[in-house]
């Protein structure tokens, strides 16, 4: 398992590359929670999500020979943009396998950042198999979205910042809620948080029908869930946590929470109205858990990650326009 030294090293590589997003507090949210809530808006991060952290940390450590052969990744969109951006900074060609129904903003931004996009049907195709075949044909390096030590360490800088910033504010986080897909952000952040704040409780937050991490934590081994159910939380739609990430989460995560699509929509509207932030559905899951009372927040200091803000205008406008 990686440790705090790996995450601190990643933070050094990311200096002047990733934005050190602030911790923000909102009076209305604190009132609802009955305690202090500190939000980490990674929707303000470069490329609109935390994913640049892990992607750059991995790509910046490739040998010249590896970099010359290029990289291949698979992603619903946020990792794609992070890889494309990091590759562009480092002069590396990046090919990314993406669902054909990924938000058009994510597809277009990935291409705009210089990524070569290969689309597939997420409900019938195997994105990892497609990517690995392509990488083998090209001799390219694989850049997984979460199942890699360097990715986990890079994403862990989010937790490192939460710990250090909350301590600096005089309000050290007692519990941290993290939107969870494959577990890279959660596992890396949990390592950093526990190193800085040994008594902190870490919780995953997943969309309904995709609570594979919660089921895995409850069963004590990795569980796969069916992926045929459609969801607006495209950034979190994994059928199983990663092996590396689950090993870490099993040791360091206290429990998992699940939110409905309606609860996610409420959180997106709250972020717009009260925080003046655009947050994508998957990125709003942790905030949704707080607003829906999925965890006790009264009298506590709770931190939550707004993990991304890449959402199509049409979907966002429709959600904002729904009757409350």
Image (tube, grey):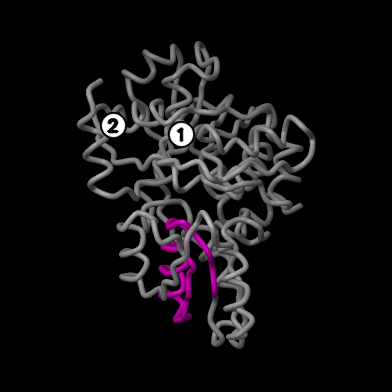
> In the rendered view, does 246 fall on the left or right side of 102?
right
Q: Secondary structure at mark 1?
A: helix
Residue at image point 45% right, 60% down:
99
Task: Judge by depth and name the residue closer to the eye, 228 or 307.
Answer: 228
Label 2: how many residues lie within 10 Å, few (<14), some (14-19) or many (20+)?
some
Residue 127 within the magenta-colored segment of the rendering:
no
Q: What percent of the width, then of the height, locates residue 17?
A: 43, 63
Which label belongs to residue 275? 2
- Quarter assignment of residue 139: bottom right
Residue at image point 70% right, 40% down:
249
Q: Secondary structure at mark 2?
A: helix
- Quarter assignment of residue 200: top right
Residue 207 lies, with reference to residue 307, above or below; the image says above
Q: Is tag 2's residue or tag 1's residue first in the polypeptide sequence?
A: 2
Q: Which residue is mark 1?
A: 285
Query: Cα distance, mark 2 to mark 1?
Result: 15 Å
Residue 88 within the magenta-colored segment of the rendering:
yes
Q: What percent of the width, then of the height, locates residue 16?
A: 42, 62
Magenta part of the chain: 72-97
Which label belongs to residue 133? none
């Amino acid at each position: 398992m990686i440790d705090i030294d790996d995450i601190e090293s990643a933070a050094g590589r990311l200096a002047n590359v990733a934005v050190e997003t602030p911790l923000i507090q909102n009076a209305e949210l604190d009132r609802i929670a009955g305690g202090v809530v500190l939000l980490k808006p990674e929707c303000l991060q470069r490329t609109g999500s935390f994913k640049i952290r892990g992607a750059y940390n991995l790509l910046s450590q490739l040998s010249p020979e590896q970099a010359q052969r290029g990289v291949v990744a698979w992603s619903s969109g946020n990792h794609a943009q992070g890889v494309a951006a990091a590759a562009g900074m480092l002069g590396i060609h990046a090919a990314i396998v993406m669902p054909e129904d990924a938000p058009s903003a994510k597809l277009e931004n990935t291409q705009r950042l210089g990524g070569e996009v290969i689309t597939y049907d997420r409900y019938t195709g195997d994105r990892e198999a497609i990517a690995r075949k392509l990488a083998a044909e090209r001799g390219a390096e694989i850049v997984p979205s979460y199942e890699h030590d360097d990715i986990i360490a890079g994403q862990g800088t989010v937790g490192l910042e939460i710990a250090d910033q909350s301590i600096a504010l005089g309000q050290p986080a007692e519990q941290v809620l993290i939107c969870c897909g494959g577990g890279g952000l959660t596992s890396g952040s949990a390592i950093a948080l526990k190193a800085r704040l040994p008594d902190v409780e870490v919780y995953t937050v997943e969309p309904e029908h995709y609570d594979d991490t919660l089921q895995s934590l409850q069963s004590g081994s990795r569980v796969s869930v069916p992926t045929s159910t459609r969801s607006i939380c495209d950034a979190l739609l994994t059928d199983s946590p990663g092996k590396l990430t689950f090993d870490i989460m099993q040791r360091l995560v206290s429990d998992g929470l699940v939110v409905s699509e309606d609860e996610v929509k409420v959180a997106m509207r709250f972020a717009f109205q009260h925080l003046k932030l655009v947050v994508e559905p998957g990125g709003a899951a942790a905030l949704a858990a707080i607003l829906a009372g999925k965890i006790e927040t009264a009298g506590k200091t709770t931190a939550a990650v707004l993990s991304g803000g890449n959402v199509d205008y049409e979907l966002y406008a429709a959600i904002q326009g729904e009757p409350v």
